Each structure stands twice: as structure tokens, then as C-alpha cells.
Image (cartoon, rainbow, N blue to C red):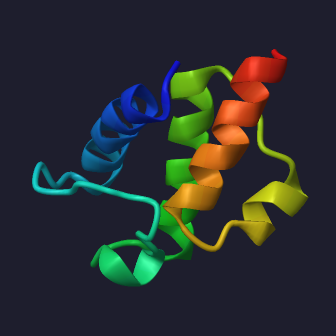
Amino acid sequence: MTREELYDNLNEVFRDVFDDESITVNDETTADDIEDWDSLEHINLVAAVEQEFGIRFSMGQVQSMKNVGEMVDIILSQIQDG
């Protein structure tokens, strides 16, 4: 899966979790950029991303993610290793 394909899937996950069809994420997107992205929605988002890509984030990975780009890097590494 290419980074671009991953973003296509990730945009759908974000739109579904936040119920906002206008969301388009990129490497620099953070919780500050999406109105309803609070700690509870972060948990929902992580669970939805894990389900979409068939992966599991470690607690350390979840805590270390500073933006969507870092999430994508982790997803890609787990997909390639899996």
C-alpha cells in the first residue's frame, strides 16, 4: 500500500469517526485542526484505524503520535512488517 492509498483510506476513517465529509488529513494534521477531536474521539479514532488496517498500536505509539504523518509512518511500518 502506498502512502497515498493509505491517506485515501485514512480520510474515510476520519470522516466516519468525526461525521464530517469535508475532512482531508495530511502529514501535518493534528487534533487542533479538527473541531471534535478530543481525548474520547482520539480513542475512537485509534480503534477505527486499527480495525481499518488490521493492526494494533502499542500504548507508547499512541502517546508518541504528534500528527497524522506519524500515525501513517507507524501504520506503514506495521503493514510492511505484517
Q: How many marks?
A: 0
> As drawn, which residue projects farthest toward the left?
22
Residue 33 vs residue 81, the one in the foreground: 81
> Which picture quadrant has residue 60?
bottom right
- Residue occupying the point 54% across, 38% down: 49
Residue 43, horizontal then vertical, whole percent? 60, 57
73 lies above or below 78: below
Residue 6 vs residue 18, the one in the foreground: 6
Residue 64, horizontal then vertical, whole percent? 78, 69
- Residue occupying the point 55% across, 69% down: 67
26 lies above or below 47: below
- Residue occupying the point 66% across, 37% down: 75
> Which picture quadrant has residue 5?
top left
8 lies above or below 17: above
46 lies above or below 80: below
Query: On the rendered structure, is 9 left or right of 57?
Result: left
Query: On the rendered structure, is 28 left or right of 23?
Result: right
Query: On the rendered structure, is 75 left or right of 37?
Result: right
> As drawn, which residue projects farthest toward the bottom?
32
Q: Quadrant of the C terminus?
A: top right
- Residue occupying the point 25% across, 47% down: 15
Residue 65, horizontal then vertical, whole percent? 69, 66
